[in-house]
Amino acid sequence: MKFSINASVFASVLKQCARVASRKGGTAETHVLIGVEANELTLIAQNGSQQIIRRVRTSSLVVEAQGHICAAAQKMEQIVSAMPGDRDVKVSLSDEKLVITCARSRFSLATMNVDSFPLIKVSTPVAEFKVNAANLRDSGKSVAVCCAREDVRQYLNGMLLDVREGTLYLAASDGHRMGVCRIEGVTGSDSQAIIPVASVDDFLTFTTESEACIRLYPNLAVVVSDAGEFYTKLLEGKYPDYQRLLKKPSSPSTLKANRPALLASAQRVALMADQRSFGIKFNLGREITLTTAASDIEGNAASEVIEGQYIGSDMEVGFSARYLTDILKTVTAEEVEIVFDGATGGTHLSPTDCAQQSFVLMPMRI
């Protein structure tokens, strides 16, 4: 094996692979499998739950000798990232060591036999669909904030992909809040899968092409592109009926408010909220006020009158400021509509200019 490639290009690909590779020392999964042939460089990394394959075709790649070898992913990424980005890096195999040189720098890395590298293999997919990649990325990131992280209900520790009649629904919930986005114009078969929260970011951003092709297997989801593939194991379990939770109350009370202003007000009031619950409450009536749910043990409290259009009966509704502000941050619209179902029912929050995006936030007891 012997090749050279631009340091910046090589570092970018290695960074993706090193993020996936396991960090548990002493295992084969801490390595990256490097293969070079003709005019293509291939890098593969995995950690038992995820696998990434990156193929690089660039004018800066010069192949002198083909071959395959494994080296420590993290260490190799650190070395190449430290090189001047405008220089070429030369990589070669010598006496079972991977030699990396750039200008006057020379590094020698231990290697592992290619046959020892554990690959995730797939057979025939059970479903496949294609979706606009930018819509998948933006919509997925907006609801991913609602994913649970360590819930005993394993199916909540991820994001649901639900394809129905040409529409992809993305849903995430931690039991306290839920986010759902709808993407139209999806081609492929109806299907469902739950992507683990640890894989969501890479899954959403893997492809840079205009369209993302997603293949589903019995226990895997794969994003396929010309630049490679990203594999992730799926979570088991039946996801809750999110469509039922999206139904708004028959006699709602509605508040329309400027999103940036509401976010700023909630953040200011939350400065004086109890540090355990971060509870704040809406006092809704002729005047709309945000207050701390209760004074803390030192007697600290805060209140702020906010601008907005409220239609409904007078009421007080409490929320976790953390959950509320997380949702307001991920919404990009200037105005939001908040539909209250009393002080205990699920509260619906959505941007006024985007019917495809909805959130449900459960109130707190005041």
Image (spheres, grey):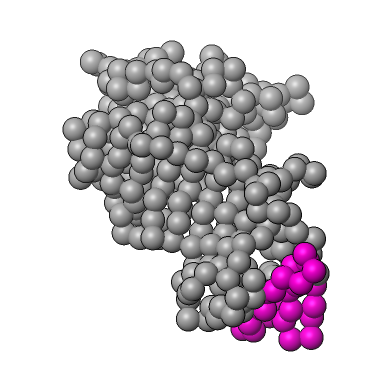
Between 67 and 325, the one lying in front of the other is 67
Instruction: Kindly identify the residue that appears in the image at 67 percent across and 78 percent down.
Output: 90
Residue at 68% in and 74% down: 91
Residue 38: x and y in percent read 49, 73
**Measured from the top left, where is residue 18 in percent x and y?**
65, 55
Majority secondary structure of magenta residues:
strand
Image coordinates of residue 241 in percent, x first then y, are: 34, 18
Determine the image quadrant of residue 298: top right
**Residue 84 lies in magenta, yes or no?**
yes
Task: State left or right for residue 322 relative to residue 217.
Answer: right
* Residue 48 forms part of the magenta stretch: no
Stretch of the chain drawn in magenta: 83-107
Quarter occupied by the N terminus: bottom right
Who is closer to the viewer here, 50 or 357? 50
Q: Position of residue 287 (x, y in %)?
A: 39, 30
- Residue drawn where x is 45% and y is 56% of the image: 228
The quadrant of the rendering that contains the C terminus is: top right
Residue 103 visible to the viewer:
yes
The residue depicted at 79 percent of the width and 44 percent of the height is 25
Q: Quadrant of residue 184?
A: top left
Tell me if residue 272 comes above or below residue 89 in the rendering: above
Decide if residue 102 is on the left or right side of residue 232: right
Left or right: residue 188 compared with residue 91: left
Residue 338 appears anywhere in the view:
no
